[in-house]
Amino acid sequence: MLKQMMAEIIFRNPGDMNPAIADLIGFDFEVRILDDWIDDDGPAVWILATTLSGLNQSAFFHSVRAIAEPLGGDVVEAGLAPDDLEAWIASKS
């Protein structure tokens, strides 16, 4: 059964972000740059990638990491998306 999954990814070098976003979109992810999460103390930028997946949480985490890390992204969290994703995002900013 497909479930809504999400991954929080940080790019410490914003120049690495666009190729990773392109790859994630190529794997049917919706990607959002979290403008409110931009690090004031450095150049880091956060993105949130969401998709429907039949993978369990561990396999999903490893699949996202395999896409993002070679392109400079650090997967902070990946797994089931909360029921109210917008409220979750607002609570983190």
Image (tube, rainbow, N blue to C red):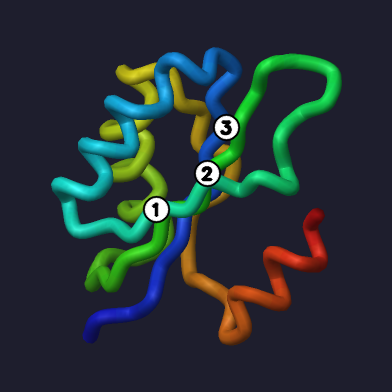
Up-down: is 58 above or below 23?
below
Q: Can you tell which mark lies on residue 10?
A: 3
Q: Which residue is mark 2?
A: 47
Under mark 3, the amino acid is: Ile
The answer to whether mark 3 and mark 1 are in CB contact below 8 A is: no
Under mark 2, the amino acid is: Ile
Up-down: is 42 above or below 53?
above
Residue 12 position, x and y percent, is: 59, 18
Residue 21 position, x and y percent, is: 33, 38
In three-dimensional space, the C-alpha distance between marks 3 and 2, rounded to whole angstroms, equals 6 Å
Residue 31 position, x and y percent, is: 39, 53
Under mark 1, the amino acid is: Val
The answer to whether mark 2 and mark 1 are in CB contact below 8 A is: yes
Q: Can you tell which mark lies on residue 31?
A: 1
The answer to whether mark 3 and mark 2 are in CB contact below 8 A is: no
At 62% from the left and 83% from the top, the residue drawn is: 84
Residue situated in front as seen by the camera: 58 or 48: 48
Residue 50 position, x and y percent, is: 39, 62
